[in-house]
Amino acid sequence: MTSDTDQSGPQRPTPGPELPLVLVTLAVALMSGFQTVQLLRQHADQQAALVGQEAAVQKGLKVRQQLQALSRPTAQLAAAGNLHAKQVIETLRGQGLTIDIPVH
């Protein structure tokens, strides 16, 4: 008679927690590396977009300064009561442009 503990062939050792632990650690490391590379690429893309917009921002500031330089005398005339200057200022405000009215 054979007992249940007596089996033919070699016994397999019970697998330990090392293999799953190594696989999980490797997966986390790969995921972290991938995320780091993606973040670095996004950062570089955003920096390039910022540099690309700088010229347009500077141009917009220049146009704004020119508009202010041209509109100050008109605003002064409007403040003095000139009807046509008031119409020009109101037209500019109607288009969404704010004009700084100088204080005497």
Image: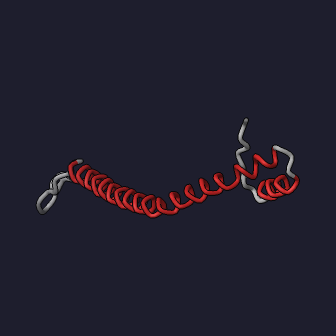
Q: Residue furthest top?
A: 104
Direction from residue 94 to residue 31 in the image, left or right: left
Direction from residue 17 to residue 8 in the image, left or right: left
| Quadrant housing residue 104 | top right
Give the colour scheme of this rendering: secondary structure
| Quadrant housing residue 44 | bottom left
- Any part of residue 1 in sight: no
Nearest the eye: 20 or 46: 46
Task: Determine the residue positioned at 42% across, 60% down.
Answer: 51
Task: Determine the residue positioned at 29% across, 56% down.
Answer: 33
Number of numbered discs present? 0
Tell me where residue 2 appears, x and y as whole percent: 17, 56
Task: Determine the residue positioned at 16% across, 58% down.
Answer: 7
Tell me where residue 12 appears, x and y as whole percent: 16, 57
Nearest the eye: 57 or 79: 79
Tell me where residue 101 appears, x and y as whole percent: 73, 43
Q: Quadrant of the N terminus?
A: bottom left
Asked if residue 8 is positioned above or below residue 86 in the image, the reply reads below
Direction from residue 101 to residue 67 in the image, left or right: left
- Any part of residue 37 in sight: yes
Tell me where residue 16 appears, x and y as whole percent: 21, 48
Asked if residue 15 is positioned above or below residue 9 in the image, the reply reads above
